Amino acid sequence: MVDGSGLSTSDRVQARALVGIIDLVLDGRHAELSSMLQALPVAGFSGTLANRFTKPPAASAAGRIFAKTGTLDGAYALAGYLDDASGRVLSFALVANNANLGAQSATTPPGATANTEAALDRVAAGLAACGCS
């Protein structure tokens, strides 16, 4: 990270690195990190996810996804963990870059944020619905 906040436009974090951090917290060998799990918003119920996962098809995953959102200048992210249909815990990181591409100005086109967040929610809900092995 360039500035320590993660907000610099020069920062680049791979989704794989985010999943690695989540896995580290979930593995239970680092008790000092466990508070991070309780701090994550719950899909459809709290924090930045309180108003997300409320409409079909993503609504089926409400209460089963625990994640942090991120939005900055055309980049949208959702990273955390979920309980899938078979009861397994899966960690995930979804990142959509250049979501505002094609805009005629530097401002976000109408609906771009809602559409991108809804798409990320559908993917996460799909993972939650999976009984993947």
Image (spheres, rainbow, N blue to C red):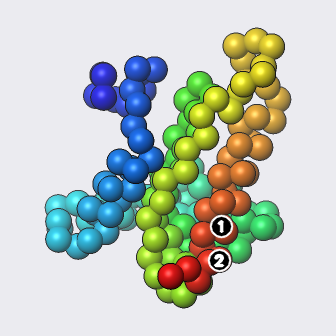
Vertical position of residue 60 compared to residue 4: above or below: below
Quarter location, residue 37:
bottom left
What residue lies at 50% left-to-right and 82% top-to-bottom? Answer: 133
Residue 71: image location, x then y, percent: 56, 36
User: Quick one: 59 or 133, which is closer to the camera?
Assistant: 133
Quarter location, residue 24:
bottom left
Vertical position of residue 18 compared to residue 82: above or below: above
User: Quick one: 101 or 83, which is closer to the camera?
Assistant: 101
- Mark 2 Cα-neighbour bin, 10 Å: few <14, some 14–19, many ≥20: some
The amino acid on which the numbered mark 2 sits, given as a three-letter code, is Ala
Quarter location, residue 22:
bottom left
The residue where tag 1 is placed is: 125
Residue 77: image location, x then y, percent: 55, 44
Question: Residue 43 — which label?
Answer: none
- Mark 1 Cα-neighbour bin, 10 Å: few <14, some 14–19, many ≥20: many
User: Quick one: 124 or 61, which is closer to the camera?
Assistant: 124
Question: Residue 129 — which label?
Answer: 2
Residue 117: image location, x then y, percent: 68, 47
What residue lies at 55% left-to-right and 44% top-to-bottom? Answer: 95
Q: Is residue 114 left or right of residue 90?
A: right
